[in-house]
Structure formats: C-alpha cells, structure tokens
Amino acid sequence: MWSVVKGLLMRALIIYLVSSYFKRTPPAEDGAAPPTTVASSNIWKNGTPFDLYVYLSDDERGVAHFRNSDALLWRQEGLVYGDWSSGPDSDGLFFFNGTFTPSEKMLNNGSIYVHVYTVLSGKSPDPSQPNYVQEQVIHRSKQLNKFRKKVYKKTHNLLTGETEQSLEEQQKAELTTYEILSMWHPNLTINIVDDHTAWVQGKVPKPLDEYIEFDQHENKYYPILYLNDYWNLNKDYYPINDTTRTLPLFLTFQPMTLFKWQLYVAQSMRKSMVSWMMIGTEEATEDQDALKEALLDTNPYLLGMTVIVSLVHSVFEFLAFKNDIQFWKERESLEGLSVRSVFFNVFQSLIVLLYILDNDTNPVVKFSVFAGMCIECWKVKKVVNAKVDRGTRSVFGLLPFKVRFEDKGTYVESSTKEYDEMAFKYLGIALFPLIVGYCGYSLMYHEHKGWYSFIISMMYGFLLTFGFIMMTPQLFINYKLKSVAHLPWRMLSYKFFNTFIDDIFAFVIKMPMMYRIGCFRDDVVFLIYLYQRWIYRVDPRRVNEFGTSAEDEQRRQVAVANGGSDSAGESRQLVSTDSRPKQD
C-alpha cells in the first residue's frame, strides 16, 4: 500500500511542477529582454467537420500502410471538433471493435504501430491522393505491443527432485536466463483535446511541447491528438507468439479537456523519470497497477484521507530513524538494553540483503537494504568493544586476523547480561520447533534453485513471519529489571504511531490476510511495551545507591538557583533516572 501512496505523491508533485512551469515565462538567453511574440490560435475552430483514419503497421514512420488495403482498420466520417454530444449515446464517444491478422514480422517479436490521422472532411491522409492537403493533416503514431522480460529459473523439489515446470520451461532455463516477449493489450483510446489556449511558439513548457505542433506558415497550431493507454493494466497483457492467428482491438474515440490531458501527460513524464532512476521493471509495473486499481476501486474521500495519513506516516518514519540513530550515538550505558538483539538485527539485515541479491531486485532496493545493514553494523561498535587479533587466522584460515568482541563494562557489571542470556535461551527453545517446522514445509511443498537459494529464502520467509518474536527479549529484560527508563521512547513512540497507521490501511485497503495479521501482531508487542511503561513508572521518592532521590536533587537545584550552595565537603551525586517501582 505504501508504494501506491508514494506513486500518488510523486504524481501530485509532477503535476504541480508542470502547472507551475506552465504559468511562468522562460527567460531569454544571455539575459536579454524576451522577444515580443504573438500568441497563436487553434487552426480548427469549434464546429470544424473532420474524418478519422486508423491504420496498423509494423513501421513507425513509413507510409507503406497507405499501399496496403488491409492496413486501414477504422474510418470514421462526420466528426465535429468540439462536439461533446455526438456518438451512439450522445456523449461524444465512438467505438470500434474488431480483429486483425498480424504479419510474420509482428509474430516474431516485431513492433505493432497504430497510425491515427484526422483530416478535414472530404480530404485524404494519403500523400499520393489528389485531395491530400498537408496543412490539414494531423498524425500520431504509437506502439501498441510492449516487450516484457520473462525470467527462467530451473527449480525443483530438493527432496524428490521433481518439478512443476513444463519441459519447455526447463529447456529454456538451461539455455538462457530470460526471454523477451511481445505482449498485447486490445484497448486504446484516441483523444482529441478541446483546446483554444493562446500558445506561444517556443514557450510551451515541457513536456507539453512534445504534443503541440505549429504551422510554419501561419501563426496557428494544430489540434492535440493524444493516444491514451494509461488504464491498461500490465497484468492484463498477454504474449504474442507464432500460434497467434488474430488479435482483437477495441478503439474508443473521445474528446478531452485541456486539464485532463495535462494530468495524463504528467503520468508520461513520471514514467520517463522512473526509467531514468533505474527502477526495476517488475516492481515498477506492479506499483503502477496497484495505483491504478486504487484510483478505480477506492472511494475518493477514503483515497484522500489515505494520502494525508501516509504523509504523517512518512514523517514519523523519518523521525523514528533519526531518533534511533541519535539514541545510540549518545548512549553511554548499556544497562537494560539487549545487546544480543543488536547482533540479531545485523544477521536479519544480512539475510534480507542476500535474498534480494538472489532474486535480482532493482538497484534502489539493494542500496536501501545495504544502507540499513551498515547502520545495524554501526550499532555493534556501540554495544561491544571490538579488537583485531592479527596473530590469529579466522574463517577456516582464509583471513590473516581475527576480530574479538568483548562486552562493555556497563553491560557486564549490571544484571542486564544475565537477563539477556536468559531471554535468548528461552527464545531459542521457542524458535527451534518453529524453524524445523517451517524448514520442513518449505522442503516438501516449495521448489528451489539449489540448497543455497533454499537456505536464504527459508530464513527470509521465517524472519518475515516470526521476526516480531525478536522484540520479546527486551520485554523480558524490562520485566526482570522492573524498569523501562533505558529504552529509546521517542523512537518507539513514532514506530507505534506508524503501526497504528498500518492498522488503518489493513482495514480499508485490500491486502492479503497474512499481512493484516502481521500488522495486529506488532500491535500486541507495542501494547506490552506501553503496559510496562505504565506499571514501571518513575518514582521520584525512590532512594538510589548514593542515598539521594530525585526529589532531593530537585530541592538542591532550587536552592542553588536561589543563591544557596552545597556544603564544601558534600559530593554531588547524580540521581538515577531508573523507573523501578518504589521499594518499601
């Protein structure tokens, strides 16, 4: 769901930038005053009659389709520019529903282009015809098929050696790692924009200037013809192969307002930005489909609330990250903190990184996970003393040194280490049957590329399912110490708020049941943290090991502020901020 909201926010930003740029006038080069230009007008006025021609071809720019009688797919006469009440249903819409026979080149991973022409009624788009008038022909072309990468992996059951893959898939997996397929979707909408803006040649902002063409002889521009396939979901595309005899095609002709056209152009601008950022193809298409389905299926008010709440989620996520780094940077004492949980977080981050490397995830996700693992490794230096022994070899003798970890004094001298070891002992007893059961299930019912892939995917799936259990050792330490003052409460508060927001998403957004259970499962752990904070409240009257209390320290500070001073021989002792209940 978060990917859907990020897509919405990115689109809103792009639309804002396009609109802002549309309102400003670009400065002239070399600081000179901008030249005086005359605003142009649309070459077609409202009420202009025109005809629509649609051709199919395997050539993007050629005119060979004019010489092929089968290339003309649709001819619609008697259209009127600016007419919103024509058509079979008096709504300005015209439809074409038919099939065509693809050529051999199209079947062999060739491109399929649609060429759309609008001309004045009675004129021809074909340059070889006598009634052809170049100044009155508007032409747009678009590739209808898309190319997708299909990845082949040779997998099998590690116990039986059997596989559910077909013989063809196994053979392709042995020869190559992926195959480029030509994919087809039958829907396309042809929009003509009802626009009479006084555009100025050379000052149309990007990316709108790609669609507005000016007449070189007159101070006019041609109507905007836009070929729209935005609502074609990627999951609805299917492959074209040599067994395909005919392909269906459903065309819709519809007028469009200028504002709506700008929104669609903003989407095309975002698509080019995504390609520039090297976002993985599979993840990007899934995010686009999720966003489109949310726009189609979700109530607009609910969608607006989701965007606002998600902005808050993003802020809390950043604040939690910031306060977590700040807490460990300034932390001197490790009393009450689970050191073993820090090491386990490093192990968990490593497993996630190895998993995404094994599954060819996009570079942005790889960098994000690697950065997270580096932060977890940085925490290790804060909880233990690391020493390099260059006289001892390690890792089966491959490394000429060995790194030794020693517990810090504040961790050893307190009872935290004893409780931490006890918590992980009980945790190991609880996790062992779960690991064995999950491993056995994965071996029996799932297929894997090999034993390495099995181990990584099994550990990743286990951590994804039961990772919340690793938060329980800190709960055990809090219970034994009867204190929660040592915890990073700012960071935990922000995470609790984000968990609550995830609960809202789990109720209102369609998602797998296991993900919903995962959201409520984390709530249980955070509620236990809150309960511990309530039951182990700070008692200012409790006397610490120096014989003073928080109330004594407060009275002393008030006395100093009023001009008094402590006796010369009295040592100033810091009052513990522990939150253990008062002991009678």
Image (cartoon, rainbow, N blue to C red):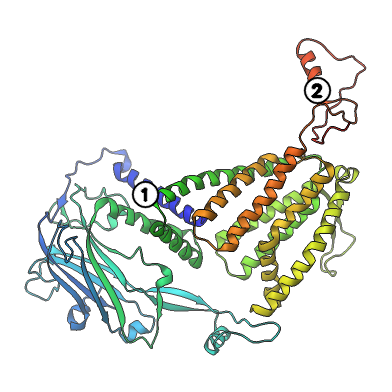
Q: CA distance from mark 2 to mark 1?
A: 58 Å
- Give me the residue at 48% from left, 53% from top: 6
Q: Can you tell which of label 2 and label 1 is closer to the viewer?
A: 2
Judge the density around disc 2: few (<14), some (14-19), many (≥20) Cα neighbours within 10 Å.
some
* Residue 144 appears anywhere in the view: yes
369 vs 381, left or right, is left
Q: Residue 460, located in which quarter of the rendered image?
A: bottom right
* Residue 449 appears anywhere in the view: no
Three-letter residue code for mark 1: Ile
Depth check: 420 or 45 in front? 420
Secondary structure beneath label 1? helix
Instruction: From this view, report whether residue 102 is shown above or below residue 215.
Output: below
Query: Residue 218 at what x, y percent from top left?
Result: 12, 54
Which residue is outermost to the front? Answer: 584
Instruction: From this view, report whether residue 112 is shown above or below residue 472.
Output: below
Depth check: 33 or 81 in front? 81
Three-letter residue code for mark 2: Glu
Q: Which residue is mark 2?
A: 551
Query: Residue 353 at what x, y percent from top left?
Result: 65, 63
Kindly indicate whether the residue at mark 1 contacts the one at mark 2 (C-beta within 8 angstroms): no
Q: Quadrant of the C terminus?
A: top right
Query: Residue 37 at what x, y percent from top left?
Result: 19, 44
- Give me the residue at 38% from left, 87% from top: 242
Q: Which residue is mark 1?
A: 15
Q: Residue 470, located in which quarter of the rendered image?
A: bottom right
